[in-house]
Amino acid sequence: MRSLLHLPLTTTILLLLHIQSTTVQAWGKEGHELVANIAYSLLSPTARSLIVNILRTTSDDDTDFLSPLAKIANWADEVRVHPQYKWTGHLHYVDVHDDDVDGGCHPSDFDKDGCAFDYARDCDKDECAVGAIVNFTNILSSYYHHHENDSVDKEEDDIWVEMKATSLKFITHIVGDVHQPLHVSRSTDTGGNDITVKLTSSNNEEEEEDEDDLEALYSYPTTDRNGNLYGHGHSHHHSHNLHSVWDTTIIQHAISKFYQGSFESFQQSIEQDVVSKTLQTFSSSECMDGRNKDCVSTWAQESWNYALHSAYAHVDGTEISTGDSLSDDYLEGRLEVVKKCLGMGGIRLARVLELALGTAEGKEEELSIMVEDKKEEELSLKKMSALRGALS
């Protein structure tokens, strides 16, 4: 039997649809829930109805702040620790291969040759976050643009039910991932995971250096980026790395210090400060189709720029190294970048879903994009058709 890692990504996805998984607590849940909540609030009623149907859930519960989309936003993190889903770990990030660049890539390197996201180099065989978004979005889109009105038997339809739900869950999560700067970052430090840092931040200045108090305030990373659990003997156990600071700590610090511990208030500030202002001045030329590799690549490049010049740099511009301390100045100085990334992630996720589900306004724009992506969609359809034949 061929290894799943050697199968086309779309085919591998389908083979795993019927595997039961055991979930564990996810990391970075607040950020993913925020992106999904913002996206859901921007969706049309038709798109919302389709999503509720795909997820086979009930309609919105007004007493619950989490939208139906937010409730599944961390599913992809939860299942990747399960053996059958280990292969999906590398779909959550992009390694920009700075090891191929003479002298590497550093915060002071503006416009240096090679210090940019390169799909051919950094997403070989589509196996990165950008390729995953394109593949999963094409699967979802294929149903609503080519399959929904066709006559199918019950077995085939049951397969599509699982395909749609699984694709939607991965899209929701990985669009969030690609908007986290250190998910599009240097391969040489595995996205900041290999840069161990000490937090000297606390809401109580008198306890600033107390490790127990810091541990109570902030979540520590429990898995590496591929979903492998850290053991007690691991160098990162009960310590922060730069990646985890961007996954959770900046958000947790902001909610605790500026938003009275309220997740809802933090989201509302992003909607007001980022989403509303962005939509008022938004350009119709902004590319937000998850089926289009070039579109998604621009989002990755944006995150890479933030990673290199904000995440990897102290507030004074010097590069962060293993063993460095990060204070409130860093956490709060990078908050606006984090808010913008979360807001843009929500805006783009909403548009990705509208286009994939066929519910987007402006059919001329949608048809134009579909023509450009025709070859990619046809390839996805051929792969799925062949697999359905093998399963019958």
Image: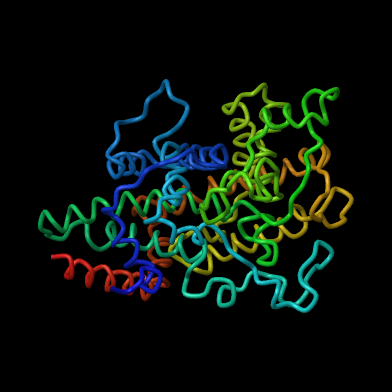
Outermost residue on the front side: it is 233
Compared with 302, 24 (above or below) is above
User: How many labels, in total?
Assistant: 0
Q: Is residue 254 left or right of residue 177?
A: right
Q: Is residue 309 left or right of residue 366?
A: right
Q: How is the image coloured?
A: rainbow
Judge by depth and name the residue closer to the eye, 310 or 6: 6
User: For residue 146, what is the image quadrant?
Assistant: bottom left
Q: How far from the left and from the top, in percent, is residue 105?
A: 76, 68
Compared with 119, 35 (above or below) is above
Q: What residue is drawn where x is 73% and y is 54%?
A: 195
Q: What residue is drawn where x is 36% and y is 71%?
A: 3
User: For residue 368, what is the image quadrant?
Assistant: bottom left
Judge by depth and name the residue closer to the eye, 264 or 16: 16
Q: How far from the left and from the top, in percent, is residue 43?
A: 43, 42
Q: Is residue 103 left or right of residue 273?
A: right
Q: How far from the left and from the top, in percent, is residue 113?
A: 75, 77
Q: Quadrant of the C terminus?
A: bottom left
Q: How far from the left and from the top, in percent, is residue 273?
A: 67, 37
Q: Is residue 262 left or right of residue 171?
A: right
Judge by depth and name the residue closer to the eye, 280 or 78: 78
Q: What residue is drawn where x is 41% and y is 50%?
A: 82
Q: Quadrant of the N terminus?
A: bottom left
Judge by depth and name the residue closer to the eye, 141 or 17: 17
Q: What residue is drawn where x is 56% and y is 66%?
A: 297
